[in-house]
Amino acid sequence: MSNRIVLNTISYHGKGAIENIVPELTGRGYKKAFVCSDPDLLKFGVTEKVTKLLDAAGFPYQIYSEIKPNPTIENVKDGVAAFQASGADCIVAIGGGSSMDTAKAVGIIINNPEFADVRSLEGTAATKNHAVFTIAVPTTAGTAAEVTINYVITDVEKKRKFVCVDTHDIPEVAVVDPDMMATMPKGLTAATGMDALTHAIEGYITKGAWEMTDMFHLKAIELIAQSLRASVAGDPQGRETMALAQYVAGMGFSNVGLGIVHSMAHSLGAVYDTPHGVANAILLPTVMEYNAPCTGEKYRQIAKAMGVDGVDAMTLEEARKAACDAVRQLGQDVGIPADLKEIVKEEDIQFLSESAYADACRPGNPRDTSVEEIAALYRSLL
């Protein structure tokens, strides 16, 4: 069986990377941008860092900001209508996963109008055309949506999130500038950083993992373990390293999939509107313990990447425990809640578990699971 890697055509990294946005647009002959960004980024002047560059170049644009933290089918439909009315011919997505996921769905539907029913994009939809040309500019160091072939939309009516996987949705250009992440509050920095760690660990142990993606994921784990605490504390170098680490994790997991941490987190986001990074961070150590028997020697490598000493001298069981403990400690150090007591209601667990089992990330989990076992994992965190 062959393995596939899909990445951006071009990506820019480091301070000042946003200076490349206008040249990329004008050099390709585009005339007007549809800027997708969320209301808070507009309010706090983050989006303006990019629109000032567009203004200075006299490059026309229209802003679309009707985007929720867990973007909905209605957000996408409204975005499609706004794009069609704008006269734009390209997209600049500025934000976290919500802005970029909305932009991906809008761009796909514009160029594949037969998928105007947003629900029809769930799974691996057979789109024929690449999405509208998109430059993705992340403002959080976590989702890596700028380099993935995935996006997630919330179906409010059915209280579920659905994952869309499509090589046609990846932004052609990613611009990863740590200055765009400088205003992230500590809580968001912690949650998105743990989201990136979840991507790296789940991508490393998923059934589809192979040598090239293992390389990405182990490096991402190492960088996150070294820099997340400093990033949360406001250290500029820590933030810059996290910006790179989350992108490297995205290079891997986008191509091999994830596991039930994400499946369970998607259910929490759909039912309770739980921030995705927080949900992943709470679930990760517990699900790692559950998956450990089906991971071979990989937890030993995770423990090493997390900076645990003396791993080579440990038994396999000791190394597995060390990996889980190191992840749990990192979450505690950056202020992640220890359990789901303030989020989950017992009467919802059956629905949450059924939704998680039906989620597109579940088949990639290294350990085959069931609705009942997922329910037990939820209950163990109450």
Image (cartoon, helix red, strand yellow):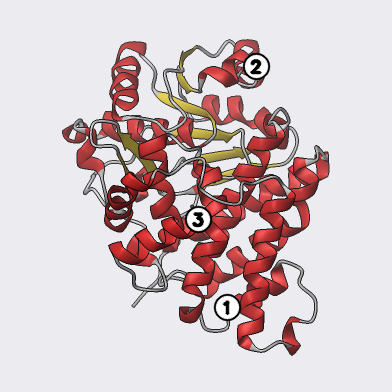
Answer above or below: position of 26 versus 337: above
Callout 3, which amino acid?
Leu
Asked whether the viewer can see residue 143, the reply is no
Asked whether the viewer can see residue 176, the reply is yes
Which of discs 3 and 1 lies nearer the camera? The answer is 3
Query: Where residue 44 is drawn, which disc sits there?
Result: 2
Q: Nearer the viewer, residue 55 or 153?
A: 153
Judge the density around disc 2: few (<14), some (14-19), many (≥20) Cα neighbours within 10 Å.
few
Distance CA(mark 3)–CA(mark 2): 35 Å
Point out the tag, 3 or 1, that comes first from the N-terminus.
Answer: 1
Please identify the quadrant where the N terminus is shown. Answer: bottom left
Q: SS for tag 1? A: helix
Callout 1, which amino acid?
Lys
Q: Are marks 3 and 2 in contact (CB under 8 Å)?
A: no
Answer above or below: position of 290 versus 374: below
The quadrant holding residue 80 is: top left
Answer above or below: position of 31 versus 185: above
Point out the tag, 3 or 2, that comes first from the N-terminus.
Answer: 2
Find disc 3 in the rendering and name its residue.
Answer: 381
Determine the residue positioned at 57% across, 62% down.
Answer: 285
Judge the density around disc 3: few (<14), some (14-19), many (≥20) Cα neighbours within 10 Å.
some
**What x and y, as percent, mark residue 274?**
47, 38
Distance CA(mark 1)–CA(mark 2): 42 Å
The extreme left residue here reads 114
Q: SS for tag 3? A: loop
**What x and y, as percent, mark residue 21?**
60, 29
Find disc 1 in the rendering and name its residue.
Answer: 298
